[in-house]
């Protein structure tokens, strides 16, 4: 393979605060669905760290790789992009990383460009902009097994010579060819260790670009690529027969949406029900360990803070992990198998009517379990306005945390009577009505946003459909671990802090070292302060305390009301709690409270995730205020009419 030699650039990292020393940095770049992240995981394993690039919501994945020589090297897994037009945050970040414009990250010493060998006509459109950076470059021809299985042809050396780079064939899923990539990276690390920079890469011309087309020629992307592929005698394998047969079903005008609906229901059912036993186990484990710890600590306010505040706060964070893991398990399988691209095409026909892309469907579907993973998964929506609208309306979906509140109030105030014979009764109809009300609010809000604050021309929805593939279990497992760490680190801090604050408000001011009655605590007084504002809704100070406490998590209001009424072991099935609510809350107030919980954003973990994903407080505060205003107006109307 031809050597690459590039001169050291005097302006490397100019304008940034990137460190001048440390392990060399290699950028891993490639189009979507090229197997880039699978290769990244193969090279780095669990030695990864995740953060956001400064000022944007795009995540920065950096992994440390160590080779046989004992040398280390940092690999930056850049977002999957198809070009450098900078129309999306992913493209802007990718361009800025390669140009050394990212604060705290030095300009890459070398570049690994990974492409799908089955689709080189489109995948190689990145090669021109990459070569313009004049860095040692390795061209990785991934999915080589599919090219060979389909009788495709490619002269690797001729293609490498056409672009003046090294080229290797790989199958990142099985590990084939990864050792050649590691050898290239080892040489980059060795050059950096001996020369202090990645200034050379073997013998050859000073620029390593001898015989290459000029930059003017490289700007004509397609012509250069076609000439290179012709010289390499490239013949694509074409779509496998299995892909053609599956697409005949999945993209069919009638059968396609039907299959899509079945899969969507399966994902929803899995998130909603499969996670329940694990969530119950997590709750039991947290409660049992808390009791064990409490029995071994002397009675004091510190023990109460540790057990009822910190320990309970940890449990309220960890309890959502099963839902998140199941969600991303399905998303990972659907994406890596190639079906997600088809699902987006199918859903786009309907979502376009309210101003959203088809990619928004699955995140919104997952919000019926929890808005936090829904906001996380909205990253699959490429258009920034569509993604923002998706995140904004996700909390309107009826998440599982609302169900204890719905179950308690419906059982207490809605008598069970048949509506459709033995199939549907009044309570089931009420529950379905609450789901429908939230969905209607989401649709209306999306329609409004895309025509006001997020107004813009409909984003072009062009998607290259990859062939169907068997997902890599290793890649999916590492993705689940990555999502878990991000969730605990980002959301855990906020919800833990809120839980501790609410506990403190309920425990002070103390009288003779004992906690005060709830109505005399700081939390109770807070409820009494807001009572005049919520009285028109049919709520008293007790409901006010419940609303304040439910900011930690919606279902907390059930336990809070049980504490206020002095009912032990209170939950949504408690007959004592139902009776207490019937004494202090009339029918109009109960319906108003249901409507309030349909609309209000009573979930600080969602606010925290929204803040992280939008890199600021503007959108989460606007979201919280909008949903609170809508909840207040809806509850007021319900109480006055009923």
Image (spheres, rainbow, N blue to C red):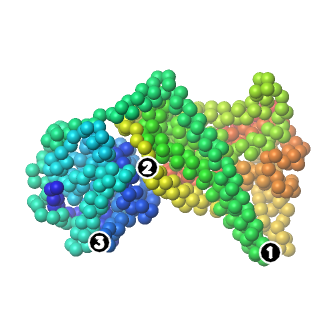
Between disc 1 and disc 2, the foreground one is 2
Q: Quadrant of residue 19?
A: bottom left
Q: Circle 3 is placed at which residue position?
A: 69
Q: Helix, strand, or loop for circle 2? A: loop
User: Residue at point 84% right, 65% down?
Assistant: 516
Residue 625 percent location from the top left of the image: 62, 45
On screen, residue 224 versus residue 297, left or right, reads left
- The answer to which of 139 and 16 lies nearer the viewer is 139
In terms of sequence position, does the residue under pointer 1 or pointer 2 come before the other?
1
Residue 579 percent location from the top left of the image: 89, 45
Q: Helix, strand, or loop for circle 1? A: loop
On screen, residue 153 versus residue 442, left or right, reads left
Q: Is residue 215 visible?
A: no
Label ID, residue 327 = none
Residue 14 percent location from the top left of the image: 27, 63
On screen, residue 198 versus residue 453, left or right, reads left
On screen, residue 113 versus residue 249, left or right, reads left
Q: Are marks 1 and 2 in contact (CB under 8 Å)?
A: no
Q: Are marks 3 and 2 in contact (CB under 8 Å)?
A: no
Q: Classify 10 Å Cα crowding around label 1: few (below 14), some (14-19), many (20 and above).
A: few
Label ID, residue 299 = 1
Name the quarter where the C terminus is drawn: top right
In terms of sequence position, does the residue under pointer 3 or pointer 1 come before the other?
3
Q: CA distance from mark 1 to mark 2?
A: 51 Å
Q: Helix, strand, or loop for circle 3? A: loop
User: Residue at point 76% right, 56% down?
Assistant: 526
Label ID, residue 472 = 2
Q: CA distance from mark 3 to mark 2?
A: 29 Å
User: Residue at point 47% right, 56% down?
Assistant: 478
């Amino acid at each position: 393979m031809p050597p690459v030699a590039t001169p050291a650039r005097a302006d490397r990292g100019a304008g940034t605060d990137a460190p001048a020393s440390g392990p060399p940095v290699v950028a891993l770049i490639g189009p979507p669905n090229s197997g880039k992240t699978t290769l990244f995981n193969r090279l780095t394993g669990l030695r990864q760290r995740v953060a956001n690039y400064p000022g944007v919501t795009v995540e920065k994945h950096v992994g440390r790789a160590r080779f046989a020589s004992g040398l280390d090297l940092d690999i930056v897994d850049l977002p999957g992009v198809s070009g450098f037009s900078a129309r999306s945050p992913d493209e802007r970040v990718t361009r800025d990383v390669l140009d050394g414009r990212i604060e705290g990250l030095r300009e890459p010493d070398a570049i690994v460009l990974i492409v799908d060998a089955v689709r080189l006509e489109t995948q190689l459109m990145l090669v021109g902009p990459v070569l313009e950076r004049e860095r040692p470059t390795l061209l990785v021809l991934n999915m080589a097994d599919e090219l060979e299985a389909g009788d495709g042809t490619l002269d690797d050396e001729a293609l490498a010579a056409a672009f003046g780079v090294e080229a290797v064939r790989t199958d990142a899923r099985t590990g084939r060819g990864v050792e050649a990539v590691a050898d290239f990276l080892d040489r980059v690390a060795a050059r950096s260790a001996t020369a202090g920079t990645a200034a050379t890469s073997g013998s050859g011309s000073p620029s390593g670009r001898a015989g290459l087309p000029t930059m003017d020629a490289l700007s004509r992307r397609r012509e250069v690529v076609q000439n290179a592929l012709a010289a390499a005698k490239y013949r694509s394998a074409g779509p496998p027969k299995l892909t053609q047969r599956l697409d005949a079903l999945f993209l069919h005008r009638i059968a396609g949406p039907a299959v899509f609906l079945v899969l969507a229901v399966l994902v929803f059912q899995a998130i909603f029900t499969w996670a329940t036993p694990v969530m119950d186990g997590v709750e039991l484990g947290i409660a049992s360990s808390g009791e064990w710890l409490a029995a071994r600590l002397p009675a004091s306010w510190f023990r109460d803070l540790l057990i009822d505040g910190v320990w309970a706060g940890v449990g309220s964070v960890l309890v959502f992990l099963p839902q998140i893991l199941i969600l991303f398990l399905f998303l990972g399988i659907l994406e890596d198998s190639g079906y997600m691209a088809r699902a987006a095409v199918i859903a786009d026909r309907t979502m376009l009517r309210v101003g959203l892309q088809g990619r928004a469907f699955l995140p919104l579907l997952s919000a019926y379990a929890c808005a936090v993973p829904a906001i996380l998964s909205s990253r699959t929506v490429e258009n920034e306005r569509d993604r923002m609208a998706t995140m904004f309306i996700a909390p309107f979906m009826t998440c599982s945390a609302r169900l204890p509140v719905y179950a308690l109030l419906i059982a207490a105030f809605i008598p069970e009577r048949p509506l459709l014979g033995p199939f549907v009764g009044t309570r089931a109809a009420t529950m379905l009505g609450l789901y429908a009300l939230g969905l209607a609010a989401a649709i209306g809000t999306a329609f409004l946003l895309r025509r006001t604050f997020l107004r813009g021309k409909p984003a072009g929805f062009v998607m290259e459909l990859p062939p169907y593939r068997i997902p890599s279990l290793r890649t999916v497992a590492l993705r689940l671990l990555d999502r878990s760490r991000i969730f605990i680190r980002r959301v855990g801090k906020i919800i833990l802090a809120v839980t501790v604050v609410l506990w403190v408000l309920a425990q002070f001011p103390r009288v003779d070292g004992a906690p005060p009655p709830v109505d005399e605590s700081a939390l109770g007084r807070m409820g009494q302060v807001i009572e005049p504002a919520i009285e028109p809704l049919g709520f008293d100070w007790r409901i006010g305390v419940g609303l304040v406490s439910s900011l930690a998590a919606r279902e907390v209001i059930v336990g809070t009301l049980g504490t206020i009424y002095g009912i032990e072991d209170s939950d949504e099935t408690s007959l004592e709690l139902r009776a207490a609510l019937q004494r202090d809350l009339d029918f109009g107030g109960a319906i108003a409270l249901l409507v309030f919980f349909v609309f209000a954003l009573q979930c600080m973990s969602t606010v925290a995730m929204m803040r992280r994903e939008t890199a600021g407080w503007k959108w989460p505060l606007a979201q919280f205020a909008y949903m609170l205003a809508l909840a207040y107006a809806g509850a007021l109307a319900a109480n006055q009419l009923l």
